[in-house]
């Protein structure tokens, strides 16, 4: 057996001072050394991240070995992150103590071999009634639903679900309905055409933050779902919805005017449809292409200027933050057009694609490239997104290699 790496040797020597640590286990010796640690060795541990990737010395590993981490039993542990196979998921976790759980379950089984099956939902979550944040990502597994009563998570306020199986078009609403989450306020998931957004949000009366990645999703269905959550305060949409009714043999047309549904209308009297998400104060519209800068300006002016309510029973909140990232060059100077709103406190992040430079410099791509310092200006918000902060485990990864 190899000795553990020098990096891990140093870390293990100060385990008594650990409060938050994330370990990338890529060598069998490092894995074995961490497995020997007990909760008494790390009496202050509150946050633990474990990444059990394919070991570089995997020939030494018993394929049927179940990883056991005594650290997971620590009575002080409140936040746990795990990345690896379902079979290697620690079985001795003190689930009832956790308030934060981040699981990335994946298998690297060969394409021509049978797809591994795992149960859904995970029965151990019944013991995790104190969870406040759950981030669940499953890759290349087939989930088999058990006909059981929904798992009650009375304290859960934030949920992110990402399923990347053989059929990413499957209805994810069934997965979400397996949980009873009366306090859920933040939801983040991939919205494929097979899923009805109305079915997802209807049983979530306290939802105030929604992040959805669109995958050929019809704009009519998206609007119907958003109409059910008028109290929504934060919305992130990645991608653009498509128009319904395209023939199967034709590419679906993007709904470039979807943003108009958020604009209050005062010219149609009582017959005017209510704007979507009237309580919105933060909106991110990312990775789009067809929506025009002119429509963006019109939307922002309508949601940052005092306008009469379209209906006596509807109050339209003033938008405080807007982030826009299209896959194209700028069409207008949006900043100049919104000078008044920006002066009044609007926070805006724009990420238009930059124009290609016609000339080539031998310094291009090096640390001396004059344009290097300009790359990413105005894009800082992409690295510090509110939604990602909701699901972030504290600390950077430590690896032994």
Image: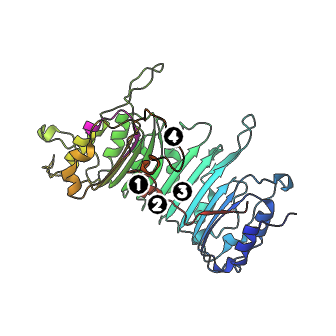
Which is nearer the N-term, disc 3 or disc 1?
3
Please name the residue that numbered disc 3 is placed on: 135
- Per the model, the C-alpha gap separating discs 2 and 1 is 12 Å
Which is nearer the N-term, disc 2 or disc 4?
4
Q: Could you say whether the residue bearing mark 2 is in a helix, strand or loop?
A: helix
Which is nearer the N-term, disc 2 or disc 3?
3
Place of residue 373 in the rendered image (x, y in percent of width and height, measured from the top left)? 44, 51
Which is nearer the N-term, disc 4 or disc 3?
3
Q: Quadrant of the C terminus?
A: bottom right
- Per the model, the C-alpha gap separating discs 1 and 4 is 31 Å
Place of residue 101 in the rendered image (x, y in percent of width and height, measured from the top left)? 57, 62
Q: Quadrant of the N terminus?
A: bottom right
Place of residue 164 in the rendered image (x, y in percent of width and height, measured from the top left)? 59, 43
Point 34% across, 45% down: residue: 226
Please name the residue that numbered disc 1 is placed on: 381
Span of residues in magenta? 285-295
Point 77% across, 65% down: residue: 5
Q: Could you say whether the residue bearing mark 1 is in a helix, strand or loop?
A: helix
- Per the model, the C-alpha gap separating discs 3 and 1 is 22 Å
Please name the residue that numbered disc 2 is placed on: 389
């Amino acid at each position: 057996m190899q000795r553990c790496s020098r990096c891990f040797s140093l870390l293990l020597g100060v385990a008594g001072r650990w409060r938050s640590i994330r370990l990338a286990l890529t060598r069998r010796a490092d894995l074995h050394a961490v497995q020997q640690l007990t909760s008494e060795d790390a009496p202050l541990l509150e946050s633990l991240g474990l990444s059990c990737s394919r070991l570089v010395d995997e020939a030494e590993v018993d394929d049927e070995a179940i990883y056991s981490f005594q650290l997971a039993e620590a009575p002080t542990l409140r936040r746990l992150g795990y990345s690896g196979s379902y079979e290697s998921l620690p079985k001795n976790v003190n689930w009832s103590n956790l308030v934060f759980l981040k699981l990335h379950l994946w298998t690297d089984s060969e394409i021509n071999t049978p797809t591994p099956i795992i149960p859904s939902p995970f029965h151990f979550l019944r013991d995790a009634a104190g969870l406040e944040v759950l981030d669940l990502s499953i890759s290349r597994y087939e989930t088999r639903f058990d006909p059981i009563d929904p798992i009650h998570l009375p304290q859960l306020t934030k949920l992110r679900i990402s399923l990347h199986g053989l059929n990413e078009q499957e209805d994810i609403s069934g997965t979400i309905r397996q949980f009873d989450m009366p306090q859920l306020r933040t939801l983040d998931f991939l919205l494929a055409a097979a899923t009805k957004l109305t079915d997802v949000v209807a049983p979530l009366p306290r939802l105030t933050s929604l992040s959805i990645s669109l995958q050929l999703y019809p704009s009519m269905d998206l609007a119907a779902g958003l109409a059910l959550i008028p109290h929504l305060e934060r919305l992130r949409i990645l991608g653009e919805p498509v128009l319904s009714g395209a023939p199967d043999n034709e590419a679906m047309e993007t709904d470039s005017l979807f943003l108009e549904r958020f604009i209050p209308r005062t010219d149609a009297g009582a017959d005017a449809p209510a704007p979507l998400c009237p309580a919105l104060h933060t909106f991110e519209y990312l990775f789009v292409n067809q929506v025009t800068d002119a429509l963006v300006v019109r939307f922002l002016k309508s949601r940052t200027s005092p306008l009469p309510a379209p209906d006596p029973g509807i109050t339209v909140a003033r938008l405080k933050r807007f982030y826009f990232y299209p896959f194209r060059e700028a069409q207008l100077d949006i900043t100049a057009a919104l000078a008044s709103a920006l002066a009044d406190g609007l926070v805006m992040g724009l990420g238009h694609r930059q124009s290609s430079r016609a000339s080539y410099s031998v310094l291009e791509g090096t640390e001396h490239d004059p344009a290097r310092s300009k790359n990413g200006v105005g894009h800082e918000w992409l690295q510090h997104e509110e939604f990602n902060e909701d699901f972030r485990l504290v600390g950077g990864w430590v690896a032994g290699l």
